[in-house]
Amino acid sequence: METWLGYFLLGFALSTPICPVNIEMIRQGAANGFFYSWLVGLGDVISNLLMIGIIFYGFSNWFSNPEYLSVIAITSGCYLIYLGMTNLKADLSISQLIGPFILLGKGFVLGLTNPIDFLSWLGVYSTIQHLPLSFFITAVLYLLIGCGMWNLVLSLSVSWCRRYLKPEFIRKFHVVSGLILCAYGIFFAWYGLKLLFE
């Protein structure tokens, strides 16, 4: 039981750092409420499952190659800069809603194109790959439940605070989140270029 709790807490902890997915969840939750924030987080959990599948089926060496990792980093950087610029240009009001599949896809792409996420899961996989398959599957399940629990807590917290937020604050946060996403995009692109030319 303590082992499974440890994997649950690890999954929870892996999701807590400020990252593009969490920023987008906060932005959607503040503007549109719980369901919109949670869908972005759900897309991220699905991308985590895909990453684990990629690593499990032996593609980890291919994706951890500096050349391929640099392509992922540069691509994700360009996407984040585009997303950040879109946030800066858009006039998001509380009444403007986005379709659920778009939000799910946005969370999925943000999670899948984050090279730091991939390296984190690669590190986790290296510690449990030698264990029996049944243990591995259960550990991954608890890790993903931990990730999902963080997304649920974040979505509930932001949607609860939303009632106290004025529209002007939401608009300002929208701009700030766009700037942060652009900063992440520049960092990832720089990291990818650095890998490519080293």
Image: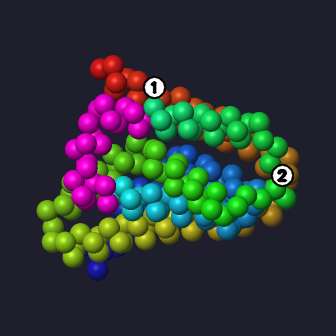
Q: Quadrant of residue 89?
A: top right
Give the alpha-carbon distance from disc 1 to disc 2, as whole Å. Answer: 33 Å
Instruction: List the residue tagged with mark 2.
Output: 93
- Taking the image as shown, residue 109 lies to the left or right of residue 57, namely right
**Is the C-beta separation of discs 1 and 2 under 8 Å?**
no
Q: Could you tell me residue 11's position as x and y percent?
A: 39, 62
Boundaries of the magenta span: 53-73
Asked if residue 66 is among those painted magenta in the image, a careful observer would answer: yes
Colour approach in the figure: rainbow
The residue at the point 35 percent across, 72 percent down is: 141
Q: Quadrant of residue 193?
A: top left
Residue in view at x 71 percent, y 41 percent: 87
Majority secondary structure in the magenta region: helix
Asked if residue 117 is positioned above or below residue 66 in the image, the reply reads below
* The N terminus sits in image quarter: bottom left
Q: Is residue 177 left or right of residue 6?
A: right
The spot of residue 173 in percent (x, y) is: 73, 44
Tag 1, which secondary structure? helix
Give the x, y percent position of residue 163.
80, 64
Magenta stretch contains residue 68: yes
Say whether disc 1 or disc 2 marks the residue closer to the N-terminus. Answer: 2
Query: For this view, does 9 lie left or right of residue 33?
Result: left
The amino acid type found where label 2 is placed reads: Ser
Instruction: Residue 41 in the image: state x and y as whole percent.
Output: 55, 61
Q: Which amino acid lies under the numbered mark 1 shown in the image of this protein? A: Trp
Check residue 190 in the rendering and tell me which mark sits there, or answer none.
1
Q: Tag 2: Cα neighbours inside 10 Å, few (<14), some, or many (≥20)?
A: some
> Label 2's element?
loop
Q: Residues within 10 Å of mark 1 (few under 14, many from 20)?
A: some
